[in-house]
């Protein structure tokens, strides 16, 4: 087979010559390939099936395809193919064109299954025993019309800085003598209780300062931070003892219907409860209907050594005073 190629900017052309006598008895699915040629900075190859490929070949048509050889990203290209007539000219009816995206990953070839009838080759296109197919490839430029997208902002960090700076605050809370500035819209978005208090018909809706009772300032501070950032500080930053903080924080979460925070507190208490704190934690679990936490406490009480340590704590006396019915449950669980 003889091939002659030429190059233009972004384009490549190939005269693909087939020895008609050689391909006359070739089988369906047998391929004759060109040498690699360049177009638009990529290497390409022409694959010709004189009797059609294995899938679409009927033995009566010649198939021709273009394949991207260079291992790169997908390339969009125009593929032209035309037969050269016996007079050396191209008939307009013989020129066909396709616009395709070529992928080097799977070696996909794209072109025409029924390019020309074999019976027409001999009658119109065999010149001195050779069939010439003029192939052209024009690589289309990869124009990126998109703008670079900045990375997704860290909304939690931004809101956390907003809380710390007190910029634009429109309400403050007095808790245990400490003042906590905040933003009504943020609190209302996070808590249905705050939404009702700050934007409903209640008196708090118009008050610039609200005093809260029955909540620890440290727990309120952590709750406020969670409402802005949806995260808690590290355990070693929550104060000591951790279990006591979690009990106060769970109470605050229940008060303001912060369900996610309440679950987080319950899980932390399950991990950190001990014989010395189990009575206080069980009282918390019973108060706020934390079934998982209650089960954890009852299992811990059931161990004799833990029970002996728990009954001498102040929390155990307060537990039985507040929930006398738990005495029966404990008696059934504890093996003394």
Image (cartoon, grey):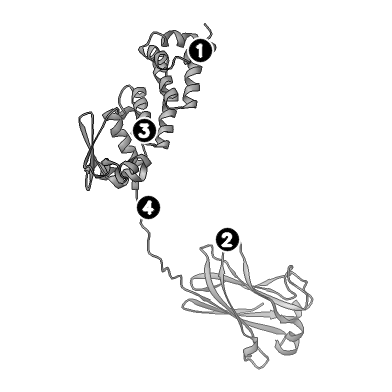
Is residue 311 something that shows in the picture? yes
Asked if the residue at tag 4 contacts the one at tag 3, i.e. Cβ–Cβ closer than 8 Å, the answer is no
- Pointer 4 or 2: first along the chain: 2
Is residue 228 something that shows in the picture? no
- Pointer 1 or 4: first along the chain: 4
Q: Nearer the viewer, residue 212 or 217?
A: 212
Q: Position of residue 133 (x, y in %)?
A: 64, 82
Residue at the spot 21% in from the left edge and 42% down from the top edge? 208
Query: Disc 3 marks which residue?
Result: 255
Left or right: where does residue 230 sit relative to residue 36? left
Callout in the foreground (1, 4): 1
- Pointer 3 or 4: first along the chain: 4
Mark identifier at residue 328: 1
Asked if the residue at tag 4 contacts the one at tag 1, i.e. Cβ–Cβ closer than 8 Å, the answer is no
Q: Quick one: label 4, few (<14), some, or many (20+) residues within 10 Å? A: few
Left or right: where does residue 59 sit relative to residue 249? right
Q: Nearer the viewer, residue 28 or 232?
A: 232
Badge 3 element = helix
Q: Is residue 154 above or below residue 231?
A: below
Query: Disc 2 marks which residue?
Result: 105
Callout in the foreground (4, 2): 4
Q: Nearer the viewer, residue 74 or 82?
A: 74
- Pointer 3 or 1: first along the chain: 3
Mark identifier at residue 152: 4
Marks 1 and 2, Cα distance to the nearest angstrom? Answer: 71 Å
Marks 2 and 3, Cα distance to the nearest angstrom? Answer: 59 Å
Residue at the spot 66% in from the left edge and 80% down from the top edge? 17
Residue sticking out furthest to the bottom? 87
């Amino acid at each position: 087979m003889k091939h002659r190629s030429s190059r233009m900017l972004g384009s490549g052309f190939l005269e693909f010559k087939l020895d008609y006598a050689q391909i006359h008895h070739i089988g369906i699915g047998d391929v004759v390939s060109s040498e690699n040629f360049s177009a638009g900075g990529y290497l390409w190859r022409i694959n010709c099936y004189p009797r059609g490929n294995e899938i679409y070949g009927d033995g009566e048509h010649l198939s021709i395809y273009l394949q991207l050889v260079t291992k790169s990203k997908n390339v969009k290209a125009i593929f032209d193919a035309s037969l050269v007539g016996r007079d050396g000219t191209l008939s307009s009816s013989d020129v066909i064109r396709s616009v395709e995206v070529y992928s080097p990953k799977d070696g996909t070839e794209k072109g025409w299954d029924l390019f020309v009838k074999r019976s027409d080759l001999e009658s119109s296109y065999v010149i001195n025993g050779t069939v010439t197919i003029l192939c052209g490839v024009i690589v289309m430029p990869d124009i990126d019309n998109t703008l670079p997208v900045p990375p997704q902002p860290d909304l939690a960090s931004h809101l956390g800085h907003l809380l710390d700076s007190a910029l634009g605050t429109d309400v403050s809370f007095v808790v245990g003598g400490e003042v906590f500035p905040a933003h009504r819209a943020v609190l209302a978005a996070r808590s249905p209780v705050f939404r009702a208090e700050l934007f409903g018909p209640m008196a708090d809706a118009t008050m610039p300062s609200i005093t809260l009772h029955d909540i620890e300032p440290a727990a309120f501070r952590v709750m406020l931070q969670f409402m802005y950032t949806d995260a808690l500080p590290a355990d070693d930053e929550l104060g000591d003892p951790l279990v006591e903080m979690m009990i106060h924080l769970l109470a605050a979460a229940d008060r303001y219907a912060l369900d996610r925070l309440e679950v987080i507190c319950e899980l932390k208490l399950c991990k950190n409860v001990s014989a010395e704190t189990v009575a206080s934690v069980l009282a918390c679990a019973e108060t706020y209907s934390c079934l998982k936490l209650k089960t954890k406490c009852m299992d811990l009480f059931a161990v004799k050594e833990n029970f002996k340590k728990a009954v001498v704590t102040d929390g155990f006396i307060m537990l039985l005073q507040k929930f006398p019915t738990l005495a029966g449950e404990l008696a059934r669980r504890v093996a003394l």
